[in-house]
Amino acid sequence: MSCENDLFCGINSVAGKSVDEMTELEKKHTPVITAPDKVKAGEPFEVKVETGVYVKHPNEYGHYFSWIEVYLDDTPVARFDLQPVMSSPSVTVKVTATHSHEGKRKIKARAFCNLHGVWENEKEVEVE
């Protein structure tokens, strides 16, 4: 079996796909990123990541998201550990891009579903 057919092999990414191009499984698991399109270097900005936006995802003891991570390009910014039932897979974090991040950058989010592996999405942001 190749990674292409194995949800637990590597990272399941929907980067570059529109919602209309996604499968039901992708819609249920994609971490959706809400952040400004342009930010100023050195000034904090808010990044919200949530799953189950396009299609509701279960949040029960046998099927849930156990963590969400946020990156600026490939640099880890934050990680949130989640418990089933008691927490919702929706997190918000303040991010500060430095002068070394000026130009087009990517906010990346990864979320781990205990049954369907790691899912990733990204949003481009312009750092001025």
Image (tube, helix red, strand yellow):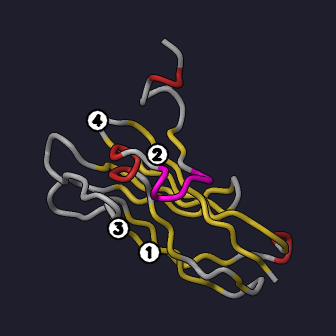
Residue situated in front as seen by the camera: 25 or 73: 25
Task: Estimate the spatial distance between the alpha carbons at disc 2 and disc 3, rounded to whole Å.
Answer: 14 Å
Taking the magenta stretch, the answer to whether it contains residue 119 is no
Point out the frontmost of discs 1 and 4.
4
Q: Quadrant of the C terminus?
A: bottom right
How busy is the neighbourhood of tag 4: few (under 14 within 10 Å), some, or many (20 plus)?
Answer: few
Residue 115 tag number: 4
Q: Disc 1 or 2, which lies upstream in sequence?
A: 1
Q: Are marks 2 and 3 in contact (CB under 8 Å)?
A: no
Cα distance in 3D space between marks 3 and 1: 7 Å
- The residue at 78%/76% (across/down) is 98
Instruction: Compute the Cα span from label 3 to label 4.
Output: 18 Å
Residue 76, relative to residue 9: is it above or below?
A: below
The residue indicated by pointer 1 is: 92
Write the residue at 76% across / 76% down: 126
Mark 3 in CB contact with mark 4 (< 8 angstroms): no
Q: What numbered label is drawn on residue 90?
A: 3
Q: Are marks 3 and 1 in contact (CB under 8 Å)?
A: yes
Please tell me which residue lies in front, 11 or 16: 16
